[in-house]
Image: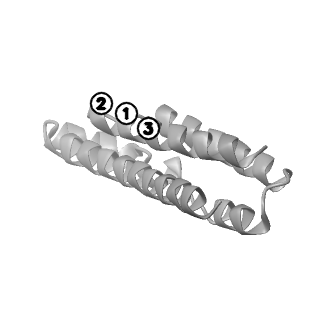
Amino acid sequence: MNIETCIKYLDYVSHECTRHLNDGRVTDDELVNLIIDVQRFKEKCMGSDLPHEIKSKISDIEMNYSIKRVERGTWYLLAAFASFGSWALIIYMRQQSKRKQALNEIKFDTSRLSSFIRLNY
């Protein structure tokens, strides 16, 4: 992998995050697939001949999202049934907020790294 490919991929991830954020609804599948792609990219970069500084910055990209943190449990169903759906809406909005926050973090990290590489290499 060379520097140009690295920049193109980082820009692609940033644009994908923007696209998903502009859709208005972010699903777990979209987010998890993007995280898996970024993890594969990180692995390819570590095995390439990129400069050590770039490899270090790429390895610092974190994906702090797990489906378990926002998964629905039995309490979700009970709250939804007891409150005629109003709690379900609140919980849904919380899930969307966490997903969007994770996408914003990935977008920020990848666009910042892309700009750093352009300016320094």
**Residue drawn at x 50%, y 57% as measured from the top left:** 115
Q: Amino acid at mark 3?
A: His
Quadrant placement of the C terminus? bottom right
- Are the residues tagged 2 and 3 within 8 Å (C-beta)? no
Q: Of helix, strand and loop, which one carries label 1?
A: helix
Apparent side of residue 94 relative to residue 48 in the rendered image (left or right): left
Residue 65, image x, y percentages: 51, 54
In the image, 88 versus 100, the foreground residue is: 100
Q: Few, some or many C-alpha atoms within 10 Å of disc 2 (few <14, some 14-19, many ≥20)? A: few
As drawn, the label of residue 19 is: 1
Does the image show residue 36? Answer: no
Query: Residue 106 placed where, x, y %?
Result: 48, 53
Between the residue at mark 1 and the residue at mark 3, the CA separation in whole angstroms equals 6 Å
Name the disc covering residue 23, or none. Answer: 2
> Which numbered circle lies on residue 15?
3
Say which amino acid is labelled 1: Arg
Of badges 1 and 3, nearer the viewer stands 3
Left/right of residue 22 with respect to residue 110 in the rendered view: left
Viewer-side residue, 47 vs 63: 47
Secondary structure state at the residue bearing disc 3: helix
Of badges 2 and 1, nearer the viewer stands 1
Asked if the residues shown at circle 1 and circle 3 are in contact, with their CB atoms under 8 angstroms apart, the answer is: yes
